[in-house]
Image: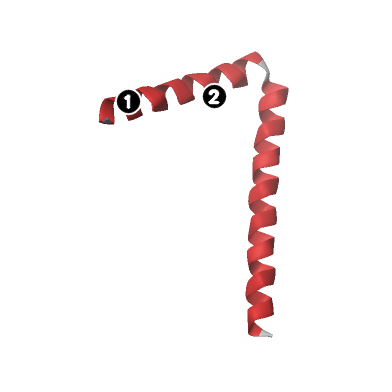
Amino acid sequence: MAQAKKVALYMLIVFVLYTIINSPARAADLVQVGFEGISDAAKSVGEFMTELIN
């Protein structure tokens, strides 16, 4: 099982590197979308906590 996790991790790393090298603009777009999603989630949690206090 641990061996399968290692192989999956290495495959993921190779895929990410391939994507960055092959199309850096697309990779940048994906990173931007990811950070926007994290930012939206943090804002939503903040709004939820604020509503709990009020």
Quarter of the rendering occupied by the N terminus: top left
Q: In this view, does 49 lie to the left or right of 5?
A: right
Residue under the point 65% across and 36% down: 31
Q: Where is residue 2 in the image (x, y as percent from the top left)?
A: 27, 31
Residue extending furthest bottom?
A: 54
- Determine the residue positioned at 66% across, 71% down: 48
For the rendered model, the colour scheme is: secondary structure
Left/right placement of residue 21 relative to residue 4 reads right
Q: Which amino acid does label 2 sit on?
A: Val
Task: Please tell me how many numbered marks the rendered image carries.
Answer: 2
Q: Which residue is drawn at 69% across and 30% down?
A: 28
Q: Choose top left, top right, bottom left or bottom right for residue 3.
A: top left
Q: Residue 22 is drawn in which quadrant?
A: top right
State the SS at label 1.
Answer: helix
Point out which mark residue 52 bears.
none
Comes first in the chain, label 2 or label 1? 1
Q: In this view, does 51 lie above or below 42?
A: below
The C terminus lies in which quarter of the figure? bottom right
The crowding category of the residue bearing disc 2, from other C-alpha atoms within 10 Å (few below 14, some 14 to 19, many at least 20), is: few
Gap between marks 2 and 1, in whole Å?
18 Å
Relative to the observer, which residue lies in front, 12 or 23? Answer: 12
For image coordinates 64% across by 83% down, the residue present is 53
Q: Is residue 6 left or right of residue 38?
A: left
Q: Which of marks 2 and 1 is in front?
A: 1
Amino acid marked by disc 1:
Ala
Question: Is the residue marked by circle 1 packed among few (<14), some (14-19), or many (20+) residues within 10 Å?
Answer: few
Q: Identify the residue position indicated by label 2 in the image.
A: 16
Which quarter of the figure has residue 42? bottom right
Image height of 16 relative to 46, above or below: above
Residue projecting furthest to the front: 1
Secondary structure at numbered mark 2: helix
Mark 1 highlights which residue? 4
